Image (cartoon, grey):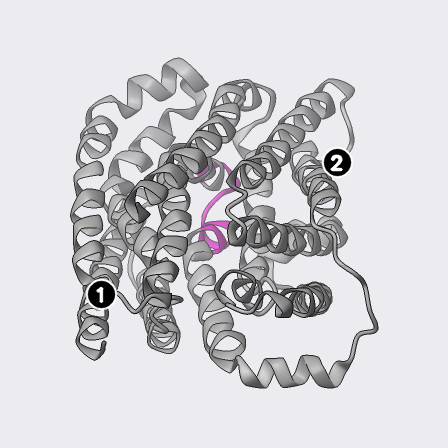
Amino acid sequence: MQIKIFFKNIKTILTGSVFEKFLLILFTPALTRFYTPEFFAIFSLFSSIVSVFCSLTCLKFENLIVITKEENKIPEILKTTFFVAIFISLLAYLSLNILYQVNFEPILKIKEYILIIFLTVLLSNTSQIFNHYFIRYSQFSRFNYIKILNTSSFILFSIIGYYLNFSFNSLIVGYLIGFVFSNIFGIYYVRFKVSKIEISNILNQLQKNKDLTVFDSIGSFIHNFSSEIPVFLLSIYFSNQILGFYALVIKVFLLPISILSRTIGTANYKYLTDLTHNNQKIFSYVLKLTISLFSLTIIPIICCYYFAEPFIIFVFGKDWSYSAKILQILSTGYALKFVALTLFETAYPIKLIKTLSIWKFVSTLIFLTVCLSYLNFYEFDNFGFFHLLNSLELIINFFLIAMILYKAKKYDERI
């Protein structure tokens, strides 16, 4: 019965995710003809900075909305997460202004959008709170609606902005507008009584759940920063045009990875939580899931290697052919990353947060050290850098998968 519910949830989430990403893929060819690679480069830099700060979300308090057993605690948890979301957003705004004052190159390139970054981080964080609320109560249709509304609003404003010839980057403002509408949807359906905020209660919850607030939130920040390192390095060491070509790959051609990873990961998160609440073993399930995920990557890798270039030229135009070469190089590394990120949700139900947070820190340190050493001490070309990125993704994500399987086995031995 639980297996049937699990696959039903996957089907529901996958349907919504496929439709959401299909909208983006459908309209991206138009956007690539409206906007140049340089325009996409600035948008990619903006969204990467937003992504890094959003990895802190609400110091991971939003996960308590799903995993807390006691129903009467949910209103207090919701109140705490909204308060922390505001705090994190203000911290992001302060950090960006400091980085601007010290002339950090990526921030200088988007200095006019610092306020928009603050608002986007805030609304993205609150949107995650609504998402976790919908997951707790298995309201996966609403979980889908909030994402579809976000994406469709972004696309619509980006197209309107091009024709109205706004002086600002319409992709960036459209990204913010998407979160505005998704939050309106969330506020309408997630209603709870607003009471007085007790700072002492929030601090007590931070202390009580320090595995989330300290280890996981910082670990997620470091790991997300690691994922965005290529964008920051490309903005510093390479031209905006190269960054724009890379942006097309990560924003469009990695969408199938995003669709399946988030869909299966979300359903996996809920299913594993139910198993652990019932004190059931999980290793056999995690192992089968891992094998299934690996099998899903075979055909996409083959397609990327043989058909990337003619497809990109046909759909996005010959000006974007360089993106095909990048995609061919990165396909194997990102296929393994898809497996690893899908399994990553296993951390919360089996209390693997501290271990994986240490892994995030170590892997990011290795990633950054190797990349900077290559860029600063060796003569490099564009393709050499992308081959290096692919090798690092393969090594780091292989160890993550092995660690998760090992910890799942140990979990079974304890119960």
Q: Secondary structure at mark 2?
A: loop
Q: Hey, which residue is sitting farthest top in the picture?
A: 314
Q: Which mark is residue 168?
A: 2
For label 1, count other residues whose C-alpha is less than 10 Å away and answer few (under 14), some (14-19) or many (20+).
some
- Who's the residue at 58% across and 32% down the image? 148
Q: Give the camera-side residue of 269 and 29.
A: 269
The image shows residue 287 at horizontal and vertical percentages of: 17, 55
- Who's the residue at 30% across and 45% down the image? 1
Q: Which mark is residue 217?
A: none
The image shows residue 42 at horizontal and vertical percentages of: 59, 42
Q: Hey, which residue is sitting farthest right in the picture?
A: 196
Q: Quadrant of residue 73?
A: bottom right
Residue 243 appears left or right of 346: right
The answer to whether residue 24 shows anywhere in this view is: yes
* Amino acid type assigned to the residue bearing label 1 in the image: Lys
Q: How many angstroms separate mark 2 from mark 1 (CA)? A: 54 Å
* Amino acid type assigned to the residue bearing label 2 in the image: Phe
The span picked out in magenta is: 231-242
Question: Is residue 349 depicted above or below 241 in this figure?
Answer: below
Q: Quadrant of residue 33?
A: top right
Residue 84 colored in magenta in the image: no
The answer to whether residue 248 shows anywhere in this view is: no
Q: Which residue is mark 1?
A: 281
The image shows residue 337 at horizontal and vertical percentages of: 30, 51
Q: Give the camera-side residue of 239 and 272.
A: 272
Q: Nearer the viewer, mark 2 or mark 1?
A: 1
Q: Secondary structure at mark 1?
A: loop
